[in-house]
Image (cartoon, rainbow, N blue to C red):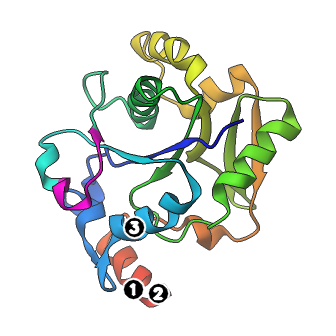
Amino acid sequence: MIQPLGVILAGGQATRMGGGDKGLLPLGTGTILSHVIDRLDPQVAGVALNANGDPARFSSFGLPVVADSIAGFAGPLSGVLAGLDWAATRGATHIITAAADTPFFPCDLVPQLMLAAESAGADIALAATPGGRHPTFGLWPVALRDDLRAALESGLRKVVLWTDKHGCGMAEFTDDRAFFNVNTPDDLARAEAML
């Protein structure tokens, strides 16, 4: 498998944070999103940001911004589909997704996901910890994008329902805190402390 492209999922509505873009909130000397980019970029062949609305608000990051093609906030799978469509135009075979509000994910996420897929004989792999699966952190094949589009258009929204249908490897990580995500102002304070 050639090195996949990376897609940062930032298409959520951030309702628990009062709306807006959580990734643009300050964290340390940067933003939550800048920390995510710094973790993902060295592991992939290129990075895009999945976000809806005016892409100009992310212009300082210098990344392509791809919007959901499924209307009405269809959840993370819609962002995965947007990323797969973008990757198809670049001739890529796979993407790796990471959530825009999870600044401490593992620096070996990509090789572990690729190994998990290979070990399971699967096209898809998701990150997991003792606390459960982390379905916004996954390896996704471009070849399944039309199947995913059809599933979304039929109303499917749960990531694991679609991944389990296709077979899915699990990349096991031991530290639940690695996938700590910032959902509330208290979480942001905790993330500052974790830095």
Residues rendered magenta in the picture? 58-65
**Residue type, numbered disc 2:** Leu
| C-alpha separation, residue under disc 3 versus residue under disc 1 | 10 Å
Magenta stretch containing residue 62, yes or no? yes
Q: Nearer the viewer, residue 155 or 35?
A: 35
Q: Taking the image as drawn, is residue 63 in sight?
A: yes
**Residue type, numbered disc 1:** Glu
**Residue type, numbered disc 3:** Val
Q: Residue at x 58, y 18 (%)?
A: 144
Magenta stretch containing residue 6, yes or no? no
Horizontal arrangement in the rendering, residue 77 relative to residue 126 (left or right): left
Of discs 3 and 2, which sits in the foreground? 2
Which residue lies under the disc numbered 3? 182
- Assign the N terminus to one quadrant of the image: top right
Q: Residue at x 41, y 24 (%)?
A: 89
| C-alpha separation, residue under disc 2 versus residue under disc 1 | 5 Å
- Say what secondary structure mark 3 lies in: loop
Q: Earlier in the sequence, mark 3 or mark 1?
A: 3
Q: Nearer the viewer, residue 126 or 189?
A: 126
Asked if the residue at tag 1 contacts the one at tag 2, i.e. Cβ–Cβ closer than 8 Å, the answer is yes
- Say what secondary structure mark 2 lies in: loop
Residue 163 coordinates in the image, percent (x, y) = 65, 28
Q: Taking the image as drawn, is residue 20 in sight?
A: no
Which residue lies under the disc numbered 2? 195
Q: Residue at x 30, y 85 (%)?
A: 29
Which residue lies under the disc numbered 1? 192
Asked if the residue at tag 1 contacts the one at tag 3, i.e. Cβ–Cβ closer than 8 Å, the answer is no
Residue 131 coordinates in the image, percent (x, y) = 69, 60
| C-alpha separation, residue under disc 3 versus residue under disc 2 | 13 Å
